[in-house]
Amino acid sequence: MSDTAITFPILGDGFVLNPQRYLEIFGFKIYWYGLIIALGFIVAALYLLKRRKVFGLEEDDIYTMIIFAVPLGIIGARLYYIVFNFDSFRADTFGEFIKNCLNVRNGGLAIYGGVIFGIIGLILSAKVRKVKIGTALDVGAFGVIIGQIFGRWGNFINREAYGISANVDSFFLRMGLTTPDGVTTYVHPTFLYE
């Protein structure tokens, strides 16, 4: 769906968005989704560093949480996606299968796996820094919320993870996805609802 134009009928017929999914630097494609997620990580880290005193934490506690939770969260998000979309990773050889699994530029992260493994990372970091697990999870929840906000805008740019199209024609806020051949499908813009 990356070649579809986005419209919002409530804003009029002339309102059309068709952003490119990536920017190209020296022949290398950098996808907006990745940049948006990276910005979300940075904003979440800065927010947690600013709010750390409310939770009675030191800067090093926050850095340790980030060092444990973020890589584990990314690994968990990929593993979750692979497990629940296993057929798309099948290959003739084990080496090819591993290559497919590691090729994140081909898409495939799932927030559920990221949250599950991120929680494991927070618990491990709490043990290492001798922080109460409940405190680590409370702090981590802010990171998840900020990450979700940014991630949903990444979904918007990718034209993915929108809502169903059933009975949306009469709905007040709907988003149109128009393919290059002129066919428009209206869906619920779930990322805007969030």
Image: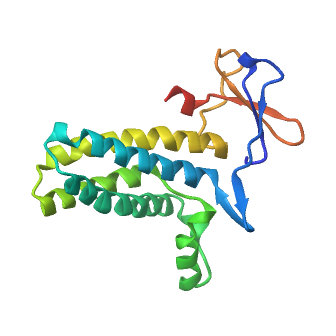
Type of colouring: rainbow
Residue 120 visible, this angle? no
> Is 27 located above or below residue 52 in the figure?
below
91 sits left or right of 131 in the view: right
Residue 116, horizontal then vertical, whole percent: 33, 53
Residue in the picture at 22% in, 45% down: 137
> Is 26 located above or below residue 131 in the figure?
below
Residue in the picture at 58% in, 73% down: 100
Residue 115 visible, this angle? yes
Closer-to-camera residue (114/29): 29
Q: How many marks?
A: 0
Residue 145, horizontal then vertical, whole percent: 38, 38
Residue in the picture at 62% in, 82% down: 92
Residue 23, horizontal then vertical, whole percent: 70, 55
Residue 144, horizontal then vertical, whole percent: 37, 43
Dividing the picture into quarters, in which one does residue 124 lie? Answer: bottom left
Closer-to-camera residue (62/76): 62
> Is 183 located above or below residue 106 in the figure?
above
59 sits left or right of 91 in the view: left
Dividing the picture into quarters, in which one does residue 157 lie? Answer: top right
Closer-to-camera residue (159/84): 159
Residue in the picture at 16% in, 47% down: 57
Closer-to-camera residue (7/150): 150
64 sits left or right of 129 in the view: right
15 sits left or right of 148 in the view: right
